[in-house]
Amino acid sequence: MARAAAFFDLDKTIIAKSSTLAFSKPFQAGGLISRRAVLRSAYAQFVFLAGGADHDQMEKLRQFMSSLVAGWDVATVREIVAETLHHVVDPIVYDEAVSLIAEHSLAGRDVVIVSASGTEVVEPIGELLGADYVVASRLEVVDGKYTGEIDYYAFGKEKARAMVRLAEERGYDLAQCYGYSDSVTDVPMLEAVGFPHAVNPDKDLRKEAASRGWPVLVFVKPVALRTRVPLPPAGPTLAALAVGGAVAVGGVMWVNRKKTRGA
């Protein structure tokens, strides 16, 4: 019998903010960015939440972050994320998303987070939520530091391609799988599954959902995870598909791609 999975976007689908920008203050405290950059991050967070994550918006955010991440120490980033994860993420996780994740787990479906953010942020959040797998981006690392170049970008159509690869590896029947996202850039991801859902959709995704008859879900209640019944623990095979050597800081989603690499 074919297996099934539930594929979740992360930002504005599971959590109420940009996962990367949410760590701007801890990154400042760790000496990675300045107070001015924190203020710019707060503004970028506002624009991200208000304007949606279309291709133009993502490009502007990439340009903003590219001036910050080059030279960051990988070990420092990992340490900051690990130490501040609960403080940063707990207050911004949607209660409705937590319930959905638990329901899919109890139904025997794997839970997979698919995000353009980097593995340094996405994988710990996945473990926190009890996900079985994460698909995330990664940055190039040289001598323990990020170069500012991208090795793998889990964005747009690449999310769908990664889902197909994982389905082949794990034996999922994508026609029996579920998908959840807020952004029109994730239409390919939603098209890849039999049961797509638009969550807090931007205006373009809302139009797509209406024309295709996709259900629209509204998540409005952030909740501290520690106040909920514990989620099923992540399986021992929790993995980031994009990991293969160097891994990326969350800011990868806004870093300019290498010209020598494909879209």
Image (tube, grey):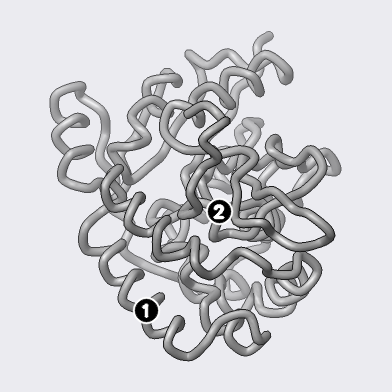
Of residue 193 and residue 230, the one placed in the foreground of this image is 193
Give the residue at x 68% y 38%: 242
Give the residue at x 26% y 33%: 215
Which residue bears the numbered disc 2? 252
Using the rendered view, name the quadrant where residue 29 is placed. bottom right
**Is 192 on the left-hand or right-hand side of 70?**
left
**Is 202 on the left-hand or right-hand side of 193?**
left
Residue 149: tell me if it is visible: yes
Give the residue at x 60% y 22%: 4
Residue 105: tell me if it is visible: no
**Is 188 on the left-hand or right-hand side of 208?**
right
* Residue at the far top in the pictured view: 1
Question: Is there a contact, CB below 8 Å, between mark 1 and mark 2?
Answer: no
Of residue 189 and residue 198, the one placed in the foreground of this image is 189
Residue 32's x, y, as percent? 63, 80
Question: Could you say whether the residue bearing mark 2 is in a helix, strand or loop?
Answer: helix
Residue 20's x, y, as percent? 51, 64
Q: Amino acid at mark 1?
A: Arg
Of residue 177 and residue 103, the one placed in the foreground of this image is 177
Q: Residues within 10 Å of mark 1 (few under 14, many from 20)?
A: some
Residue 93's x, y, as percent? 48, 65
**In the image, residue 96 above or below residue 213:** below
Which residue bears the numbered disc 1? 40
* Residue at the far front in the pictured view: 260
Earlier sequence position, callout 1 versus callout 2: 1
- Which quadrant would the N terminus be assigned to in this image? top right
Give the residue at x 42% y 55%: 62
Q: CA distance from mark 1 to mark 2?
A: 17 Å
Q: Amino acid at mark 2?
A: Val
